[in-house]
Image (cartoon, rainbow, N blue to C red):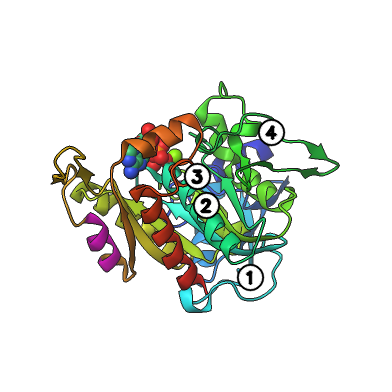
Amino acid sequence: MNKDAVIEALSKVPYPGFNRDIVSFGLVRDVSVENGKASVALTITTTDQRVPGILKAAVDEAVGAVPGISQVETMVAVSQPKAQSPGPAGAGGGASQNKIPGVKHTVAIASGKGGVGKSTFTVNLACALDQILRERKLHNAVGIMDCDLYGPSVPLMIGINGQPHVDGEMIVPLENFGIRVMSMGFLIDPETPVIWRGPMVAKTISQFTQNVAWGDLEIMVIDLPPGTGDAQLSLSQTIALDGAVVVTTPQAAAWNVARRGAMMFEKVNVPILGVAENMSYLDDPSNGNRTYLFGQGGGQKTAKALGTQLLGQVPLFEEIREGGDNGIPVVIGSPRSEAAKVFRSIAENLLATLD
Ligand SMILES: Nc1ncnc2c1ncn2[C@@H]1O[C@H](COP(=O)(O)OP(=O)(O)O)[C@@H](O)[C@H]1O
Ligand SMILES: [Mg+2]
């Protein structure tokens, strides 16, 4: 009875700087109650020396307020994030339990809000990276981990429809156009209410890193849910990321949100590798006129505010949307198109940053 009440109280304690609580993040390792004395053990991964103290105080207070609890003992164990790189220049070094076995570089694709084209960007970037790496004689080079639990759209966009094969403890990723893909969309019943999915974030992401037979990959791109901060924190607790790419649109409203979303990464020491602007402009093929439907300068502004580079600007193209809807990314379907060229140039810039 008491133990449930203690867990209930813990589930109201947020992780410092985030909205999500420590229980659903999977940070609570042990809870026991005996003769009015509660013992709580947490394990966290952080380099911020203030966090353990803040968490201990918050847990002491929350659990101390539970009826029937007269004493609280809170232990916070801190494990250092492994192979966290100080910046893009030193990215990717070191062996670590947090590295996905066989995967050389891991890049998260983030955005402050939904609908900016993050998934479209992720899929086309992955295909462009694959083309470039194949030209460099590196095959089976790219994987996509779709961590958007709320709207996993990668399977549709890359034309994969099916259920992954399970081999013992390992899930075998599905593959199309030479890209290996693992997605929540393969596992979750679309009818599962979103509120049930939230607490699954940390567990699922750790499963995606440890129980998926990715094989050897040069680079893994990760489609995150739009920037609440939950998935970012979970990711930093489980995977050693080389860094994140922030996708934004040119609008002032969007770039502000993108900047705030990116600040979440700074809190957990994940470097921002660059900003990509999507829906930058629209060209009218009949007269060559260019219009800036969503304004101008958002990508550059975001990059400047984050002290990083603008990796490139992706125009609005009907072919890009069609590619997503048909499951044939424009980079694959129309490799000579303007759109494909832009994605490849962004991929080149990203690879140069990672190297
Ligand atoms: N550059 C673009 N040109 C045309 N349509 C685009 C472009 N980028 C995204 N879209 C379309 O916008 C919609 C939202 O994109 P999506 O990638 O699902 O966004 P997010 O993952 O950020 O929510 C999709 O229908 C997609 O096809
Ligand atoms: Mg998406």
Q: Amino acid at mark 1?
A: Lys
Which label lies toward us, 2 or 4? Answer: 2
Q: Which mark is residue 82?
A: 1
**Residue neighbourhood size for the residue with mark 2, other residues' Cα within 10 Å, grouped as few (<14), some (14–19), many (≥20):** many
Q: Which residue is mark 3?
A: 332
Q: Which residue is mark 2?
A: 126
Disc 1 versus disc 2: distance between alpha carbons? 25 Å
Q: Which mark is residue 1?
A: 4
Asked whether residue 299 is drawn in magenta, I would say: yes
**Residue neighbourhood size for the residue with mark 1, other residues' Cα within 10 Å, grouped as few (<14), some (14–19), many (≥20):** many
Q: Amino acid at mark 2?
A: Ala
Query: Of marks 4 and 3, which one's residue comes earlier in the chain?
Result: 4
Decide: marks 1, 2 in contact (CB < 8 A)? no
Residue 14 shows up from this direction: yes
Decide: marks 4, 3 in contact (CB < 8 A)? no
The residue nearer to you, when weighing 258 against 12, is: 258
Which corner quadrant holds the N terminus?
A: top right
Q: Amino acid at mark 4?
A: Met
Query: Of marks 1 and 2, which one's residue comes earlier in the chain?
Result: 1
